[in-house]
Image (spheres, rainbow, N blue to C red):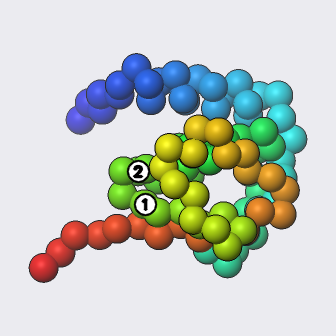
C-alpha cells in the first residue's frame, strides 16, 4: 500500500523532524495523561506528531477552545493541558 502525502503535510513533517532533532522535551497533559513532546511545537505540529487527523478533531487548550485557524500560531507550552476530541462516524 502506498501512502500519498500532500506537499503541505511533507513540509510539516520536515519541520517536525527539525524540531525533534534540536529540541528538548516538555511535559504536557493530553486527555488526562502526561506526555513528553518536543518543545517549540505549534498546535498543528503536535497533532501531526501524535498522528491525529486534524480534519476530525476539536482541541481545547488550558480550558479554552482553540479554533482551527489559530492552530498554526498557537504554541504548545510546558504544562499545557489539552483535550483532543476525535469525531467518529457511524450510524
Q: Residue at x 12, y 79 (%)?
A: 91
Looking at the image, residue 90 lies above or below residue 12: below
Tag 1 secondary structure: strand
- Residue wearing tag 1: 57
Q: Is disc 2 in contact with disc 1, using a CB cutoff of under 8 Å? A: yes
Instruction: Name which quarter of the figure residue 24 lies in.
Output: top right
Indicate the position of residue 28 as horizontal and vertical percent values.
77, 62
Q: Nearer the viewer, residue 58 or 21?
A: 58
Of marks 2 and 1, the one in the foreground: 1
Q: Residue at x 77, y 63 (%)?
A: 80
Q: On the picture, is 83 further left or further right than 91?
A: right
Circle 1 crowding by C-alpha within 10 Å: few under 14, some 14–19, many from 20? some
Circle 2 crowding by C-alpha within 10 Å: few under 14, some 14–19, many from 20? few
Indicate the position of residue 54 as horizontal and vertical percent values.
43, 50
- In which quadrant will I find the N terminus? top left
Indicate the position of residue 49 as horizontal and vertical percent values.
59, 45
Tag 2 secondary structure: loop
Question: Is residue 51 at all visible to an observer of this figure?
Answer: no
Q: Nearer the viewer, residue 23 or 73?
A: 73
- Residue wearing tag 2: 53
Indicate the position of residue 69 as horizontal and vertical percent values.
50, 44
Amino acid at each position: 500500500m502506498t501512502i500519498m502525502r500532500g506537499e503541505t503535510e511533507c513540509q510539516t513533517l520536515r519541520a517536525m523532524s527539525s524540531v525533534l532533532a534540536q529540541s528538548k522535551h516538555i511535559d504536557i497533559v493530553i486527555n488526562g495523561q502526561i506526555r513528553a513532546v518536543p518543545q517549540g511545537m505549534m498546535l498543528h505540529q503536535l497533532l501531526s506528531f501524535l498522528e491525529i487527523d486534524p480534519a476530525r478533531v476539536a482541541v481545547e487548550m488550558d480550558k479554552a477552545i482553540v479554533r482551527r485557524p489559530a492552530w498554526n500560531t498557537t504554541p504548545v507550552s510546558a504544562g499545557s493541558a489539552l483535550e483532543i476530541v476525535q469525531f467518529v462516524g457511524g450510524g
